[in-house]
């Protein structure tokens, strides 16, 4: 899709969010406005009110939105100085909080009829263009994503330029309900989850375990054929390891509390990479050995909040198909190509042929030199070009420790799923003082590449169930 087309669809969906907010304010004027952005398929708006929105309320809101669309109200951009803007927002505390953080002397608003909202845009020229929409559901959200702040109500909707696109989306939505892995998995005796004894923990039943074994056997054999060696590492380690790796600094909120035993604190692992580092450090390596490709089906534990857990797609204990490649700086491109070949081979073996690929570049906060970042980013980009893979640049979305390639697969309903990733890491090699002997018999720091194909066995298993609709095919 061309950029101009994407921008026009974003504007349409953003205006849909304003039409939603206008309808809510007409019907429930005591409601306070929060934020309402466009999304990949539609829009949402967050509201604060004492009474919960009901399905009957959504029907009323939809009818009011249809009236606003029929009125074909012009959407007008306005700019006010800070004093005037403050007066407009005097009864909107959530908007005022955002307003107080905005720099500059003027604030932009958009008005349609009696409704006005502080907003940067973009929008379409009139409400009459918002025709092919549908409100889907209501969910809870915290203001600013902070669970200590106010609980909001988020109304989701979808909107498309053409009616056939909306109809296709709704058909796929109904089909997705039939393919829900949370229903099919237990119905076929593949797995179960027992939240009363630990939410987000998966119990594999005999049939599911056999399918898992087949996937694992294929995974191991494919790795061995491509020059990987297999590792097995512990599930816990002294907490000092996670201090040294930096996880306690930037990932603590997603880690389970430590276990205190015999005056020592142990930590369940949220990642496998520090363990692979320890294996690397057990011997001195030469440039002649590189690349070292090590892979592990390593089970990790992450404290995901209860509200985001979702079947086997979002859990607290899962097995990553993790690989770490240690190489020289001049080998990044070659290893990138090798990894891309492996990823596409593996995914296509399971019937996934369509992908969305993103190359994520340096964020504002990063470690390592700009020179290394540019070298690594160019190497990954060259690998994508040489493999003739279409991709998009995702500016500033690299991990703080290096650039990355993310591969999102498309299932039979054209939904995208984040699975595979190839990440260059400057941080851990530096933190642990990794080294190898180069051609000049001097010490040099290796490059570390994180690589996953399935992402996690549990997530990939859930995607397979929904992609093939196993219950329907029986």
Image: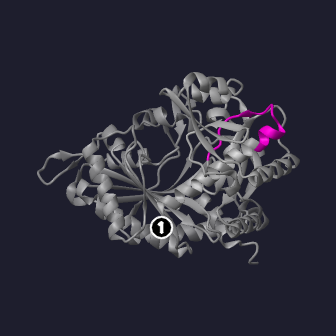
Picture quarter containing residue 32?
top right
| Camera-nearest residue between 267 and 82 | 82
Q: Is residue 13 visible?
A: yes
Q: Position of residue 363 (x, y in %)?
A: 40, 42
**Going by the image, does 328 lie left or right of 224?**
left
Picture quarter containing residue 392?
bottom left
Can you say which quadrant of the picture contains the C terminus? bottom right
**Going by the image, does 30 lie left or right of 270?**
right
Start-end of magenta stretch: 23-37
Q: Does the magenta stretch include residue 32?
A: yes
Above or below for 406 versus 255: below
Q: Does the magenta stretch include residue 204?
A: no
| Camera-nearest residue between 268 and 264 | 268
Q: Mark 1 points at which residue?
A: 220
Q: Position of residue 236 (x, y in %)?
A: 52, 42
Above or below for 196 versus 69: above
Picture quarter containing residue 386?
bottom left
Q: Is residue 210 visible?
A: no
| Camera-nearest residue between 265 and 199 | 199
What secondary structure is marked by label 1?
helix
Q: Position of residue 299 (x, y in %)?
A: 55, 52
In the picture as drawn, the residue positioned furthest to the top comes out as 83
Which residue appears at 33% of the width and 64% of the height? 383
In the picture as drawn, the residue positioned furthest to the right comes out as 56
**Going by the image, does 130 lie left or right of 102?**
right
**Quick one: label 1, few (<14), some, or many (20+) residues within 10 Å?**
some
């Amino acid at each position: 899709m061309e950029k101009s087309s994407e921008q026009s669809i974003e504007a349409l969906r953003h205006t849909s969010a304003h039409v939603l907010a206008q309808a809510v304010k007409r019907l429930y004027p005591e409601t306070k406005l929060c934020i309402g952005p466009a999304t990949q398929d539609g829009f949402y708006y967050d509201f604060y009110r004492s009474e919960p929105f009901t399905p009957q309320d959504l029907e009323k809101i939809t009818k009011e939105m249809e009236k606003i669309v029929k009125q074909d109200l012009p959407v007008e951009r306005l700019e006010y100085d800070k004093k005037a803007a403050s007066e407009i927002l005097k009864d909107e505390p959530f908007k005022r909080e955002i307003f107080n953080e905005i720099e500059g002397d003027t604030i932009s608003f958009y008005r349609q009829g009696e409704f006005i909202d502080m907003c940067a845009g973009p929008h379409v020229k009139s409400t009459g263009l918002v025709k092919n929409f549908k409100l889907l559901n209501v969910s809870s959200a915290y203001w600013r994503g902070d669970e200590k702040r106010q609980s909001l109500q988020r109304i989701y909707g979808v909107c498309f330029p053409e009616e056939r696109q909306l109809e296709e989306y709704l058909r796929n939505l109904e089909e997705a309900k039939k393919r829900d892995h949370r229903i099919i998995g237990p119905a076929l005796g593949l797995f179960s989850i027992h939240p009363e004894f630990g939410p987000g923990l998966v119990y594999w039943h005999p049939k599911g375990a056999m399918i898992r074994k087949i996937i694992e056997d294929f995974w191991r054999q494919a790795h061995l054929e491509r020059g990987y060696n297999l590792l097995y590492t512990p599930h816990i380690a002294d907490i000092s390891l996670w201090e040294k790796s930096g996880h306690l600094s930037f990932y603590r909120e997603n880690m389970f509390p430590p276990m205190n035993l015999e005056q020592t604190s142990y930590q369940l692992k949220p990642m496998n990479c520090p363990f692979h580092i320890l294996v690397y450090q057990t011997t001195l390596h030469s440039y002649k050995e590189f690349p070292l490709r090590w892979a592990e089906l390593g089970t990790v534990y992450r404290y995901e909040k209860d509200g985001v857990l979702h079947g086997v797609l979002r859990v607290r204990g899962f097995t990553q198909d993790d690989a770490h490649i240690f190489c020289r700086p001049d080998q990044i491109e070659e290893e990138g190509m090798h990894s891309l070949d492996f990823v596409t081979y593996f995914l296509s073996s399971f019937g996934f042929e369509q992908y969305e690929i993103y190359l994520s570049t340096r964020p504002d906060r990063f470690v390592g030199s700009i020179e290394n970042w540019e070298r690594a980013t160019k190497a990954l980009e060259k690998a994508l070009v040489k493999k003739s893979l279409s991709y998009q640049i995702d500016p500033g979305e690299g991990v703080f420790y290096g650039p990355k390639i993310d591969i999102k697969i498309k299932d039979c309903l054209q939904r995208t799923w984040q699975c595979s990733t190839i990440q260059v890491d400057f941080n851990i090699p530096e933190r642990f003082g990794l080294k190898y002997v180069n051609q000049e018999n001097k010490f040099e720091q290796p490059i570390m590449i994180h690589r996953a194909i399935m992402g996690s066995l549990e997530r990939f298993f859930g995607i397979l169930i929904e992609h093939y609709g196993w219950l329907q095919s029986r």
